[in-house]
Image: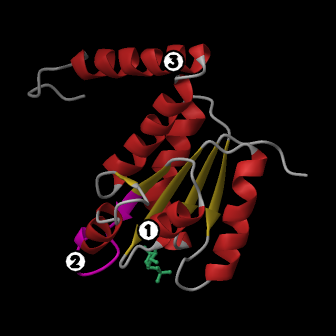
Amino acid sequence: MTDPIEVAILMGSRSDWEIMRHTSETLDKLGVSHDVRAISAHRAPEALFEYADGLESRGVKVVIAGAGCAAALPGMLAAKLTIPVLGVPIAGSALSGMDALFSIVQMPAGVPVGALAIGRHGATNAALLAVSILALADASLRDALNQYRAEQTAASLQNNDPRQST
Ligand code: RP5
């Protein structure tokens, strides 16, 4: 029996980790337990469905899936699950992530995926959005999120003369 986790982070390839680590690091910062797996929807569909089938019974409340190129992963997870699925498009081809963005954002009515920005910004925001969802039923997470925002504001105001070195 594996430990309960609140968020599952998936990516289509180990090569996506350079971007998706921002999701994991942000969840770590906010103290949210999560699993991380690279499972390709196109190269290993059976393994993906087997993993997806176990998620709800493990207590997972939000899935975050990052993928590049044809980026089927978030949509295929959404097809199997009714917990929220957030998709992060990754620039992995000559189309610089526009292919993945269109694939993730253009889900047919009835099978929703919450699409984030391409790359690092989307990866970080996927974690923050997942925490916002979890915080609806968890006051301590809401406090952690407010603290994160307060620190971000303080950091952005610190040394705010761009002529000065940081
Ligand atoms: C997608 O194909 C993955 O999500 C990755 O972004 C891209 C390339 O994968 P690799 O060839 O680097 O394994 O499915």
**Residue at the (60%, 20%) spot, across then down:** 138
In the rendered image, which residue does mark 1 sit on?
67
Which of the 4 image quarters holds residue 154? top left
The answer to if 91 sits in the magenta stretch is yes
116 and 59: which one is in front?
59
Span colored in magenta: 88-98
Residue 56 image offset from top left, x and y in percent: 71, 50
Mark 2 surroundings: few (<14), some (14-19) or many (≥20) residues within 10 A: few
Instruction: Measure how far apart labels 2 and 3 are at the Cα level.
Output: 38 Å
Q: Picture quarter containing residue 95?
A: bottom left
Tell me if residue 11 can be seen: no
**Kind of element beneath mark 1:** strand
- Mark 1 is on which residue type? Ala
Q: Which residue is labeled 3 in the image?
A: 142
Q: Amino acid at mark 3?
A: Arg
**Residue sitting nearer the eye, 14 or 12:** 12
Say whether marks 2 and 3 touch (CB < 8 Å). no
